[in-house]
Image: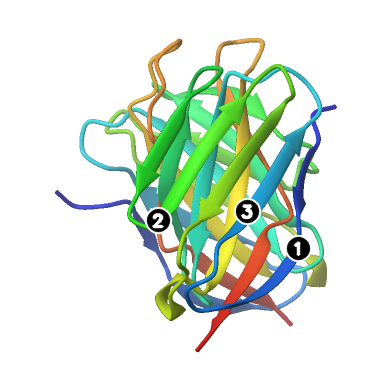
Amino acid sequence: KAGVTQTPRYLIKTRGQQVTLSCSPISGHRSVSWYQQTPGQGLQFLFEYFSETQRNKGNFPGRFSGRQFSNSRSEMNVSTLELGDSALYLCASSPRTVGVGNTIYFGEGSWLTVV
Amino acid sequence: ELKVEQNPLFLSMQEGKNYTIYCNYSTTSDRLYWYRQDPGKSLESLFVLLSNGAVKQEGRLMASLDTKARLSTLHITAAVHDLSATYFCAVDRLGETSGSRLTFGEGTQLTVNP
């Protein structure tokens, strides 16, 4: 069974540019969430999507956005990149039915460096 | 605001020894997760704990949950070098629209020395 797939794995962008990261969840999983990991702030929740609807959003500025497609694949976008956006961006998928404890699986992540 | 605290943050131990990592959280939770992360890698799921008194074991690792004390522990038995990694606990709370969000602890960097 294929795991969570994230692309690209590594990328370097310049300040002011925008970036789009992609995530394909495990087959059959309908919930996709995104997390940012930095040495200073640790792991922080960005947003969660379920059936193409954003159900939860973390405390990030509006430059961070996402969406989910009908096949459950998800993308996140960061516009007007800042140096502080350099991080590992992790996508997680889960079957996620409310009230049911499900393991949340993480992808390998996308390493973003902003210069 | 939900806060999750782990201690210790750094743990250096000898092979063959036992130790416990603690995870405290500030408000009621729907479930608690433990993850392992190797350098430069992603998060590997270890345990999901759903209810008070839950205990799960896998190999040399055992996790438990006390919801009344808002405390989870990850116990390492007879540590081996391969267990060297950073361990995170994370608490899941269902959001207002029934979505979920994980709040992570700072992580415990474990080094097992020969």
User: Disc 2 residue type?
Assistant: Gly
Q: Residue at x 75, y 69 (%)?
A: A39
Which residue was labeled with disc 3? B20
Q: Nearer the viewer, residue B85 or A30?
A: B85
Q: Confirm whether circles 1 and 2 share one chain.
A: no
How far is the residue under mark 1 from the one under mark 2?
24 Å
Q: Is residue B19 left or right of residue B84?
A: right
Q: Nearer the viewer, mark 1 or mark 3?
A: 3
Q: Is residue A110 left or right of residue B58?
A: right
Q: Residues within 10 Å of mark 2 (few under 14, many from 20)?
A: many
User: Disc 1 residue type?
Assistant: Leu
Give the residue at the far bottom of this rendering. B114
Which residue was labeled with disc 2? A107
Q: Nearer the viewer, mark 3 or mark 2?
A: 3
> Which image quarter is the C terminus of chain A in?
bottom right
Q: Residue at x 70, y 78 (%)?
A: A14
Specify the quadrant of the image occupied by residue B19: bottom right
Instruction: Indicate the position of residue B10 as horizontal and vertical percent values.
Output: 73, 69
A47 in relation to B107, above or below? above
B31 in relation to A42, above or below? above
Q: Is residue A72 left or right of residue B19?
A: left
Q: Nearer the viewer, mark 1 or mark 2?
A: 1
How far is the residue under mark 3 from the one under mark 2?
28 Å
Instruction: Using the image, name the chain to which the residue with label 3 belongs.
Output: B
Instruction: Indicate the position of residue B96 as horizontal and vertical percent values.
Output: 66, 10
B104 in relation to A47, above or below? below
Which residue was labeled with disc 1? B9
